[in-house]
Image (tube, rainbow, N blue to C red):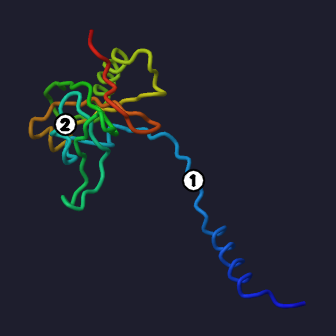
Amino acid sequence: MPLPSRRWAVAATVGALATLFAIEPSVSAPLTKTDTFVTAETSGILTIEGGECFTDPAYSAREAEVMVRYEPCEEGADNQSYAFLRAADGPWDRPGLAAYAWQGCGGFFDRRWPDRGRGTLDYYPILPTAQTWADGDRTVMCVVYRPGGRLTDSVLPLRR
């Protein structure tokens, strides 16, 4: 039996390597963001105002830190702020603050998007941290996002 030519040997090797290292398209589950996804100490978050869109936190080599950045909603974004809550003064109580934030942001979410359900859009609160609380921060930011991908424009309902 004759030996296979070098071309066949190379083609077989390349084919085997391609099969071995083939990258399957990943099917990732929708992202669920919690009250620890972004905090008041995440760089850039304190510059975001009501109704503005911004990125998910990512490392910036230029700034040498993890941060969020403002993005025009019309250009697509990961998140959009839709309300702010003011927590009562008192001692730092993260579980109590988180419960207050989820309930308050949830109420605003349900009033703004009553027909959307939790499948198309979802929300999460951005909480003060122990450090920012000690500095007097009592503001909770409510944020809307699309679990299955990015926002393609502002999702805030028009006021009539």
Provide the secondary structure element on which disc 1 rests: loop
Front residue (pair 70, 103) = 70
Numbered label attached to residue 16: none
101 up-or-down from 35: above or below = above
Instruction: Indicate which disc, 2 or 1, sits on the residue closer to the N terminus.
Output: 1
Calculate the distance from the C-alpha at mark 2 to the C-alpha at mark 1: 34 Å
Q: Can you say whether 5 is above or below 117 in the image?
A: below
Residue farthest along the left direction in this orientation: 135
Residue 25 image label = 1
Q: Toward which corner of the image does residue 44 lie, by quadrant?
A: top left
The residue type indicated by label 1 comes to Pro
* Quarter of the picture holding the C terminus: top left
Q: Is residue 116 left or right of residue 49?
A: right
Q: Secondary structure at mark 2?
A: loop
Residue at position x 20%, y 37% in the image: 128
Q: Given the image, on which type of amino acid does mark 2 rest?
A: Ile
Q: Nearer the viewer, residue 137 or 147?
A: 147
Question: What residue is drawn where x is 58% and y is 61%?
Answer: 23
Where 63 falls versus 87 (above or below)?
below
Residue 56 screen position, x and y as percent: 32, 44
Residue shown at 34% from the left, 39% from the top: 78
Which is more toward the observer, 41 or 48?
A: 48
Q: Which residue is mark 2?
A: 48
